[in-house]
Amino acid sequence: MCAWNIHFCWPGFCTGGLTENCVCANGFIKRSTLDDSSLNAGETTCQPNTQPKILICDTVAVGPNGEKNRAININASNACEHMIDMFGNFKPVRMAFIMESEFLVKSSLFPPRPNFILEENFGITDTTINVKAKSTTCLYTDVSFHKLLVDTSSSAMVTQIRRDAGNISVIDTKYNLQNGQA
């Protein structure tokens, strides 16, 4: 049954008295837990179906003597998907980065909020940099993960635009790149 307060079907609306008939607002998708052994068995919720956008993905390899090699983009965008591999004539000791991401949800398109929901917050709660090495045969290997933001409250500290900048040391042996690797 749909909860009297449509808690599980918001942002959206419930028809026919059953959560399986939940219709989610644009930009959201209905998720149902059908596994009867699950704590959330029978629960239907509306969850965002869009990913955050990475607007800026500025990456620079820095060598032991201050040499620099910047990742180049294939068009005017600084987004990560437009960057191409970088190659240098030195072994980097650190990777400097600037990353800016955005997650926008148009709550003005939602159906009216139920009385028991006082506010909604949609945005970025966590950011992580995943460092991968690319072999000469074009296979990627995960090398390390660097958590930059972890919101343990999962909603109190959301932001629609998040900018991170920093350095990742790559002198550890797990970053031991061979000739031709990126």
Image: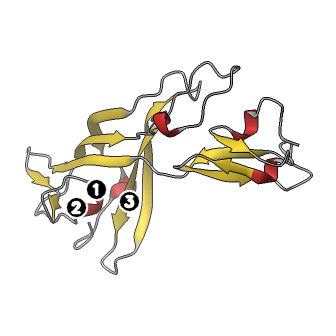
Q: Of the two numbered discs 1 and 3 on the same chain, state the one appearing first in sequence.
A: 1
Q: What residue would you read off at disc 1?
A: 80
SS assignment at label 3 = strand
Write down the quadrant of residue 7 in the picture: top right
Report how many numbered discs are placed on residues in the image: 3
Quarter of the figure with residue 73: bottom left
Position of 5 with respect to 63 (left or right) is right
Q: Position of residue 88 (x, y in %)?
A: 13, 63
Q: Nearer the viewer, residue 101 or 137?
A: 101
Quarter of image, res 162: top left
Q: CA distance from mark 1 to mark 3?
A: 13 Å
Question: Residue 6, labelled with which disc?
Answer: none
Q: Position of residue 27 (x, y in %)?
A: 51, 49
Q: Position of residue 138 (x, y in %)?
A: 34, 77
Residue under pointer 3: 132
Distance of mark 1 from mark 2, alpha carbons? 5 Å
Which of these two is toward me, 90 or 156?
Answer: 156
Q: Residues within 10 Å of mark 2 (few under 14, many from 20)?
A: some
- Secondary structure of the residue carrying tag 2 is strand
Question: Is the residue under label 2 in contact with that under label 1 (CB below 8 Å)?
Answer: yes
Residue type, numbered disc 1: Cys
Residue for badge 2: 83
14 lies left or right of 174: right
| In the image: residue 116, left or right of residue 55 | right
